[in-house]
Image (cartoon, rainbow, N blue to C red):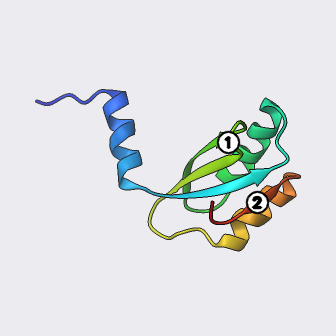
Amino acid sequence: MYTISSHELTKTVIAMNNTIKISVSGMHCGGCTNSVRMALEKINGVVSVRVDQATGTAEIDYKDQKPETDDLVGAVERAGFKAVLPV
């Protein structure tokens, strides 16, 4: 029997996904990054999101079908920020 750690499983799942990187402007604090992350996580097909305030970027991991550009930009704008695709 082979046992896999949760860390190894997470790396495997992320490796199986595709990633989109976008620029996000207007973030000034941790609350901003959380707002952007939560907005993007609601999009169908998105499996994880990493938002970096310092670089002004968001990395969106998705599985199967790539999210529509309008959906990504719209989610960020509804959260009160500006998104630019691609980085």
The residue drawn where x is 85% and y is 47% is: 26
- 31 left or right, relative to 10: right
Rendering coords of residue 7 (x, y %): 37, 29
Q: Which residue is mark 2?
A: 83
Q: Which mark is residue 70?
A: none
What secondary structure is found at the residue carrying circle 2?
strand
Rendering coords of residue 84 (x, y %): 73, 63
Tell me if mark 1 has few (under 14), some (14-19) or many (20+) residues whose alpha carbon lies within 10 angstroms of its own.
few
Rendering coords of residue 69 (x, y %): 66, 71
Residue 55 to residue 43: above or below = above
- Foreground: 67 or 22? 22
- Foreground: 2 or 74? 74
Q: Return the disc, 1 or 2, that comes first in the chain's sequence.
A: 1
Q: Most extreme residue toward the right, as rendered?
A: 80
Q: Which residue is mark 1?
A: 55
Residue 64 to residue 60: above or below = below
User: Can residue 42 be seen from the camera position used here?
Assistant: no
The residue drawn where x is 80% and y is 51% is: 25
What secondary structure is found at the residue carrying circle 1?
loop
- 79 left or right, relative to 18: right
The residue drawn where x is 75% and y is 52% is: 24
Tell me if mark 2 has few (under 14), some (14-19) or many (20+) residues whose alpha carbon lies within 10 angstroms of its own.
many
- 81 left or right, relative to 5: right
